[in-house]
Image (cartoon, grey):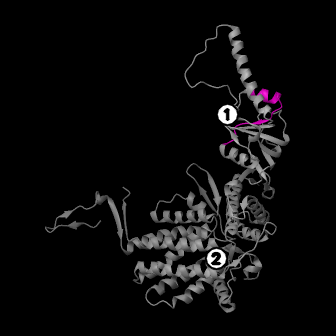
Amino acid sequence: MALAFDEFGRPFIILRGQEQKSRLRGLDAQKANISAGKAVARILRTSLGPKGMDKILQSPDGDVTITNDGATILEQMDVDNQIAKLMVELSRSQDYEIGDGTTGVVVLAGALLEQAEGLLERGIHPIRVAEGYEMACRIAVEHLEHIAQKFEFGVTNIEPLVQTCMTTLSSKIVNRCKRSLAEIAVKAVMAVADLERRDVNLDLIKVEGKVGGKLEDTELIHGIVVDKDMSHPQMPKHIEDAKIAILTCPFEPPKPKTKHKVDIDTVEKFQTLRLQEQKYFDDMVQKCKDVGATLVICQWGFDDEANHLLMHRNLPAVRWVGGVELELIAIATGGRIVPRFQELTPEKLGKAGLVREKSFGTTKDRMLYIERCANSRAVTIFVRGGNKMIIEETKRSIHDALCVARNIIRNNSIVYGGGSAEISCSIAVEAAADKYPGVEQYAIRAFGDALDSIPMALAENSGLQPIETLSAVKSQQIKDNNAYCGIDCNDVGTYDMREQNVFETLIGKQQQILLATQVVKMILKIDDVISPTDY
């Protein structure tokens, strides 16, 4: 720690406990920060693209996650370094905003930092590097607008959406049945989309999973699936044209809030008390019957007696249904959630064409399907798979696909994938660098080189010769002046991404470049790190 001296040469203390703090300043601080950022990017680099590797992450309490979703990997990694935490935030913000491209954004940021390191060693001031990056970022984002293409789709023509979702799913573990999953995701989004306002509320799509079966059994249900069964085994398992009462009050006698004692000294008193309780249950069940309900869904439990009465009165019921599921059921069936029995009226009941209980395999696992609802704006994607990890990873993959479909509905411009957009931007940025006098042009060129790192990583992960492949594709792009030559990861035999149907959303790509540049600018501006030492 640097000490300060007064005019008599005596040291005096500026920071509290400064002998216990370590300090990095100037170029050392920047290099340490850059190497931390590069280390995080290096972890994710191998999981980019359709041939990317998966990572296994074990939490402190022994839960194992297998994934190649950038945001999930960084969330689960317990990162301690401040700069590495910035990279985690970076992938999280890409996940919140776009939902896809979380790996690419970190790889790009790592490449930008790597290029910046070389510039700093040559003695270029970090602020000039940051400004050059900012200019290059603007050029790249404008160029993306220029090469983007509009994708027309409608309620009947959903093929473009399916193709784009398939691109997203091809880099995941589920790529062997990406076609069916992409169709499921697109149909789910189209079911809840508001095409006039170009808006999609993803909360209306519930993704539910159950171990067993195979991935191909994953299905889309226009309705709600609840992981509960009827409260009594003898209740009917199949109800057509159900009228559903959705309650948040328990089927139990009321409990006074104050402390109380009941003295029962004779049998008669006990009998009256029991009759009173029975009448109470009777009234409850009768209220539900009177308004015409044929199914009761309750947030709380039932007394055994209430359960028995409901069975006798032919009123099927489901208990212990969670709050979120209750809301979804209410949205789907057009019912209202009723907090008290006194408030039950016929117009507050939800309507569903079919409620059925389905059992799985040889286990006692049963689930309740509520289908053919009055308002089909709430849907469920029901995932099956061999084990828990596959199901969790499939849920994450479907989430990415849903987000991509939503982004295309919001803004239907696409760019071509396979690194073609990055190569095209890199050519544009390098061409524009010559127009800038001054030191910034070095930074702009470095930005162009960094953009090449994504196609390079794609080629590496696919087992191709990275430099050879990249230069072949780049020269092809320059020669034909087209923006859709990319890395042929799947060995189809053509560089043309239009033939391979590899698309990405324009807003996703722009967001990647903008976010990565912002984070790198922030890291370059840090020149002093004061941290408490470990002992």
Give the numbered dot on residue 460.
Answer: 2
Q: The residue under label 1 is which amino acid type? A: Arg
| Residue at 77 percent of width and 38 percent of height | 346
Residue 379, given in percent of the width and then of the height, sits at: 75, 54
Question: Mark 2 and mark 1: span between their CA atoms?
Answer: 63 Å
Give the numbered dot on residue 340.
Answer: 1
Left or right, 402 with reference to 114? right
| Residue at 45 percent of width and 63 percent of height | 82
Lower position in the chain sequence, tag 2 or tag 1: 1
Residue 497, given in percent of the width and then of the height, sits at: 73, 79
* Residue 440 against residue 380 in the figure, above or below: below
Along the line of sight, the residue nearer the viewer: 100 or 199: 199
Q: The residue under label 2 is which amino acid type? A: Glu
Span of residues in magenta? 305-322
Give the numbered dot on residue 102.
Answer: none
| Residue at 72 percent of width and 46 percent of height | 330
Left or right, 36 with reference to 457? left
Q: Secondary structure at mark 2?
A: helix
- Foreground mark, 2 or 1, reads 1
Along the line of sight, the residue nearer the viewer: 118 or 179: 179
